[in-house]
Image: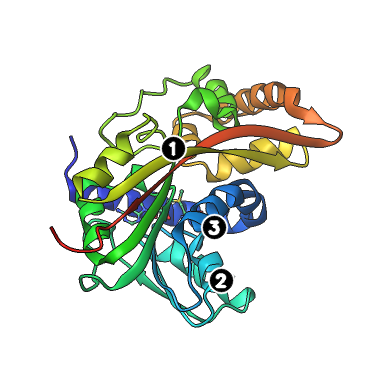
Amino acid sequence: MPSADEIRDAQRAAWAGLSASWEKWDSVIMDQLGPVGAAMIERLDIAEDQQHLDIASGTGEPGLSIARRSPKGRVVLTDLSAEMLDVAARRARAQGIANIETEVCSADALPFDDAAFDSVSVRFGYMFFPDMAKATAEFARVLKPGGRLCSSVWVKPEENPWTTIAMQAIAAEAVVAPPDPDGPNMYRCAAPGDVSALYEGAGLQDVAEWDVDVELVTRSPEQYWEMISEHVSLAVAALQQVDVPARERIRADAIAKVSAFDEDGEVRVPGVARCIVGTKPATNG
Ligand SMILES: C[S@@+](CC[C@H](N)C(=O)[O-])C[C@H]1O[C@@H](n2cnc3c(N)ncnc32)[C@H](O)[C@@H]1O
């Protein structure tokens, strides 16, 4: 079992390597994940002067959308990867959003005072943290009493054909080791109730979880393969193990399979995410 430092180092390197692809495919990724960000924001009750912390912000969402809704507020975007946050800062400038700052840090060791924020968001970050309970305790610590935490994770692979089509094509050519259930991977938090239990363990109340449908829309099966093979952490890692001819066979297989989702010139592949919300008790004790 790798140490927390080893997990952080591996994640930092992996996401530094993925940052250019996330910027390249920004509009497709943001359209796919947008409904999840919107569902999270709805439960966070954002005021115009909100002090908000976005964890594992990556290229900036949902932090940038929250900053736009909170013109007199301040949003701190944090991530382990400086390269991902550089993309977030470029996206903020391009969108004319100035009430943000960025801070490179790990979710399980936050450089902020106790009770500094009205709300905390974590979109698709939980599954990569070395110690999810320690990170949740940090989120509770930096929340003001009465403040809310909302996060999202992926439900099981069977409900997310947008990744399983590619992963099954890869598995036909390469031995893809099953992910360590206790180590970072996209589907680590898929079991219902897992993240809620972390929230309750950190003393949060009124914890609720609900599922949100997403759809990955690309212009063609070929574009589906190009973007998945370049930006999905699981696929990128697995493809590093195969040679060029095998990669070509995988590409052809994935394109053939995803063609079943081709409708009127667009490929629309479904998926399901889970959102989890909780509130820090208004008073201690
Ligand atoms: C799938 S991306 C999510 C990005 C963004 N929130 C979104 O939904 O578009 C996951 C992010 O988690 C970050 N991450 C991984 N381990 C982390 C850690 N220990 N602390 C903070 N961020 C971490 C990665 O660098 C990456 O940017």
Cα–Cα span, label 3 and label 1: 15 Å
Which of the two discs, 2 and 3, labels the residue nearer the N terminus? Answer: 3
Residue located farthest toward the top when viewing the structure as drawn = 172
Query: Residue at image x 34%, y 55%?
Result: 12
Write down the residue under mark 3: 20
Q: Position of 226 compared to 263: left or right?
A: left
Q: Which of the two residues, 142 or 186, is positioned nearer the viewer here?
A: 142
Label 3 Cα neighbours within 10 Å, binned few <14 / some 14-19 / many ≥20: some
| Image spot of residue 189 (x, y percent) | 36, 35
Find residue 69 and name its label. 2
Q: Amino acid at mark 3?
A: Ala
Name which residue type carries label 2.
Arg
Residue 74 is marked as none
The span from disc 2 to disc 3 (Cα, nearest Å) is: 27 Å
Mark in front: 2 vs 1: 2
Secondary structure of the residue carrying numbered label 2? helix
Residue at position x 37%, y 30% in the image: 192
Distance from disc 2 to disc 1, alpha carbons, whole Å, reads: 36 Å
Residue 147: percent from left, percent from top: 33, 63
Disc 3 is placed on an element classified as helix
**Badge 2 vs badge 1, beta-carbon distance below 8 Å:** no
Tell me if residue 244 comes above or below residue 214 in the rendering: above
* Among numbered discs 3 and 1, the one appearing first in the sequence: 3
Q: Which residue is mark 1?
A: 237
Camera-nearest label, 2 or 3: 2
Kindly give the residue lying farthest to the right in the view shown: 264
Q: Where's residue 237, x and y in %?
A: 44, 37
Left or right relative to 217: residue 97: left
